[in-house]
Structures are given as structure tokens and as C-alpha cells.
Image: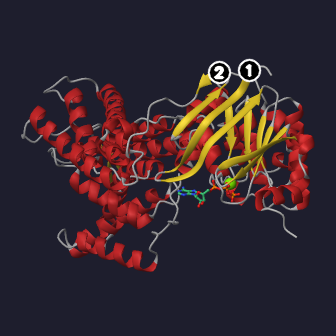
Amino acid sequence: MDPITLFSIIKGGLVLGALYALMATGLSLVWTTLGIFNFAHGAFIALGAYVAWQFASADAYGLPLGLALAVTTGVMFAIGAVIHFLLVKPFERRADVVLITVITTLAGSAILENALLLIWGPRSKQIPELVEGTVAVAEFQLAWSEVLLLVVVLAILIGLGLFLRYTRPGRSMRAVSQNREAAQLLGLDVPIYFALAFGLSAVTAGLAGVFVGTIRFMNPAMGAEPLMKALIVVIFGGIARFSSPIYAAFIIGLLEAFSIYVFGLYWAPAVLFLTMIVVLLIKPEGLFGKYQRTL
Amino acid sequence: MADPILQVTDLSGGYDPVQIFRDINLSVGAGESIGIFGPNGHGKTTLLKTLSGLIDPWSGDIRFDGQQMNRSGARGSRRWQNFNYDAITRRRMDPKTVARAGLIHVQQGNLLFPELTVDETLSISTRAASGRQGWSRADVLGLFPRLSERLVHKIRFLSGGERQMVSVAAGLLSAPRMLILDEPTLGLSPKVRSELCDAIVTVRETGLPIILIDQDVAFLERIIDRLYLFDHGRISRVMERDEIPGHEGLMAMLFGEVT
Ligand SMILES: Nc1ncnc2c1ncn2[C@@H]1O[C@H](COP(=O)(O)OP(=O)(O)OP(=O)(O)O)[C@@H](O)[C@H]1O
Ligand SMILES: [Mg+2]
């Protein structure tokens, strides 16, 4: 393998890894905080892409990209919080909440995807590239959009980590995730922190969707495949700490890029699943996981 | 007696469908402290969880500082609850509201937040104070000097005694108007235990009303004005501090004379 091919495989793997990290972090944020699995996460990915398209595309409102992204962030946060109050909160006190919310979030996902179809129609769309041009070092080429993606994703993840570690709402959210009863007894408003987790999760999904929307054509079901990958990442990496799905995402991204090169596009998913199965056989709690869920 | 700060009337409750306690009446005056003494597993902790709103009462009333803590309304039948949106989503009691009113419950064997550090835990523990003035961070670190050296340690690496101290410290930062302590000295080594007991006596000396559950009669006598004997989910006897017959005597009251 020549260095240029190797470079482009690694580059592709890192880009994939960054996207998976963004999606998986949102997924595990909700899982660790609320103890439920959000099947509407994939629909959030599509929704983020469409909302950003609506504000940014020259065919629609045509706002400057930065502004469009800011608006998308706000919209996604609000939608995430609302979805929590509609689909999860009403069932919170039931013993079978995990099962019920599988159904309600699946339903929410179907409703959201069909709403996208209804509003924006079936025609494929694409978000304009966030930045154009490439940067080249010797023969190694890197598109600015790829650099931007890596930088933005890392900034979001680091920002989220700092938020959880150093701010009061972030610490309170971790407290709620670790011991709901004790948090309530200290006067913390648990539903608010749940909504916050859901909102942040939707924001990360939406921004991941924006990046996907610049790379591929958008359609309302575009979140399904990334959701599957995010799920693999979360299961593969475990959720012992905030950072474990992030490491796992980059491992999966690189693995996928290499297996596409070696085994071809069709066999890559099989290789991923095989790796996951082997890892889970050896370490059932995930590569970096522990049995408890904590944030 | 002036208006009681806590007034519990005919309270019954438990873990649906198992009733754990019934017909509890308690009245604690401002500045007063009470103790509850009873055998293991008879429902003391369940009663306290009901007072702080972690589980809904089945019937009866809880008034704290003149304010009704439980929403009234009959308990629906179990079958009905499964279909009734309202019964699923609306608590008849909300622990957050109780805590913000100043009734602070320090749980038995409290694990708190295993992955947070002591410092982080203290930093989020002022929410229930809701603007009331109370113990400051410096005050609680003065009360529990051990914690000053443990600030950066995660709760799960602390000893049982230190963890209990963090629990009490977090409760004090909530600016309590009344403190509920559920077996705070359980399973501690003698040295740590006496440190904690002394600290709780210091807290008591500020005039803060306390509900204390403990198996150690000598410690109870340092804190409380009145002792409630708790037997099979009921209060079987109430006695003033100077009427307490010592551990043996209490056991005899609970289990009959043992010869
Ligand atoms: N979450 C629960 N669900 C159902 N039953 C429970 C639950 N928690 C406790 N119980 C039962 O309720 C009864 C009373 O328990 P509780 O902890 O209130 O007793 P206690 O008097 O505080 O005992 P101890 O002195 O050991 O702390 C026990 O029989 C216990 O098994
Ligand atoms: Mg108990």
C-alpha cells in the first residue's frame, strides 16, 4: 500500500470516526442520564440536516452558513426537549419505562421522518459545502471541509466534556444520572436535567446530520444507517465514561475505512459486526465499559 | 407549644401493594428534635421516604411549616392507575418541592453520586436552599475537617464514614429548616462514629430540628427531646427524653420481657 492510499484511508476513517463519535455521544448521553434508549436519534440526524438545508440553501432562506448552523442548534435543542416531554416523561414512573419508550421513540421516529417527507418532499437535497478548497502537504490532500468537520466535532465533544465536568448544570446532570433519588432530595429538578440531556443529544445528532448532508444526498430515512453505526459504537465501546464511545467511534471509523479498502464495500459491515461480536464475547461490557451506567 | 414545624396526621403508606406503616401521627415543634427507635425492617426508612416525597403516601397528611406537602386526593385503584395518564405522571408528592421547602432527608447508607468528587457534590448541593441563608461551604468543611483533604476524591473511593459526612454536609448546604437523619452512624468504626456524632450534636445546638433514627440510645439522648417507639409499622409508644429506659428497657418494650 502506497503512502497516499494509506493517508486517504486514515483520513476517511477519521472523518467517519468523528461523525460516529458525535452521534454515539448523543445516544449515550440519553442512555446514561435517563436509562432509556432513544430510537428517534436517527430521525434527529435527518431533521438536523433538513433544518440546516432550509436555512442555508440558496433554494430556501439562504442565510449565511454560520447563522444557519446556530439556528439549527437552537431548533434541535428545542425539539429534543419537547420530544422528551411528549414521548418519555409521561412514562417515567412506570416500572416498564424502558420497554414503553422503545415503542414511543420508534413511533416518534416514524412520525418525524414522515413529517420530513411531508414538508420537504421526496426530492434529494444536499447542503452546500461548509467551506471549499483543499489543503495539500506534499502529495497528501485534505479538503478544508474535512478539516472543519474534525475540528468542529472535537470542539463540540471537548465542550460537552467541559460542560459536564465544570459547570453547575453539567455536574447536576451527572448527579441526576448517577443517583436520581439523592439528586431529588437535594432539590434538583430531575425532569429539567432529563430534558437538557435530550436537547443536547438532539443537537449533536442534528449537527452530525448537517455534516452527513454535505457529504451525501439527504432523504428522510438518512439517519437509519448512522443510527445503526452509533449503536454499534456504543455497544462496542461501552459507556463507562463520557469518552468511551468517542474512542470506540474512531476505532470503528478506521476499521470501516480499512475493511472497505481490503474487503470491499459489501463486506465492510460484516467485518464490523464480526469484530463487535468477538469483542463482546471477550469483554461483554464493551471495550472500555463497566457494568454500571454513569456519566 | 407553638405551631409545629412538622405535623404528620394519620399517615399510611408502603410499596404498592404492600402496606408498610399505618396511622402515624407525629408532631415536631419549632426547635424540637425527635427520635424514632425500632427493630430492623419494620418500616422506619419507608416512613422517612414518604415524609420526603420519594414515595407517595396512601392516606393521611404531611404539613411542613404550615404548608401541605402532599396533594390531597384519594389513591386510585391499581387497575385504574395503569390506564390513568394523570395517575402515572402526576406525583401526589414531589421530593424536590419538599427539599426546597427546607425538609432535608439524609438517606440511610447514602451512596450519593459515586462518580462525582466531594468538591463537585458540595458545589451542586445548594439548590434546595432556594435563597435561604444557612450553612456555607466553609462552615461544613469546618464541621467535617476530614473532608477538606478529600475534596478531589470521588465519592466511591471514600470510606463509609467520610461518605456519611458528605451526605450530612450536602444536607446542611441545602439550608435545612429540618433535617432527617436515617441511621447516620450505622456500621462506622468507633473513632469516625464519635466524630460524626459530635458533629451532629453541634448541628443540633444551632437549634435546627432533627428527626433522628439510630440504634444507639446514648446518641439519641444527646439529640432528641422525644422518642417514638416504632413497632411493625406503627408507633407503639411516645416518651420524653428523661423517660427513656435505656437500650435494654426499649428492647423489653418492643419484644416483651426477656429473662
Ligand atoms: N423498594 C422496596 N420495594 C418493596 N419493599 C421494600 C422496598 N424497600 C424496602 N422494602 C421492605 O419494606 C420493609 C421495611 O423496610 P425499611 O427499610 O423501611 O425498614 P427499616 O425499619 O428502615 O429497617 P432498617 O432498620 O434495617 O433500616 C422491609 O420488609 C423491606 O423488605
Ligand atoms: Mg432503615
Does label 2 or label 1 sit earlier along the sequence? 1
Residue at image location 44% in from the left, 64% down from the top: A237
- Tell me: residue B206, above or below residue A276: above
Percent coordinates x, y for residue B145 in the rendering? 87, 45
Residue at image location 78% in from the left, 48% down from the top: B165
Q: Which residue is mark 1?
A: B3
Q: Amino acid at mark 2?
A: Gly
Residue B159 visible at all: no
Q: Secondary structure at mark 2?
A: loop
Between A250 and A261, the one lying in front of the other is A250
Residue A212 visible at all: yes
Kindly identify which chain the residue marked by label 2 belongs to: B
Kindly identify which chain the residue marked by label 1 belongs to: B
Q: Which mark is residue B75?
A: none
Tag count: 2
Percent coordinates x, y for residue A139 in the rendering? 33, 57
Q: Which mark is residue B66?
A: 2
Percent coordinates x, y for residue A288 in the rendering? 50, 66
Residue at image location 74% in from the left, 44% down from the top: B181
Task: Specify the quadrant of the image occupied by residue A220.
Answer: top left
Q: Secondary structure at mark 1?
A: loop
Q: Amino acid at mark 1?
A: Asp
Between A194 and B30, the one lying in front of the other is B30
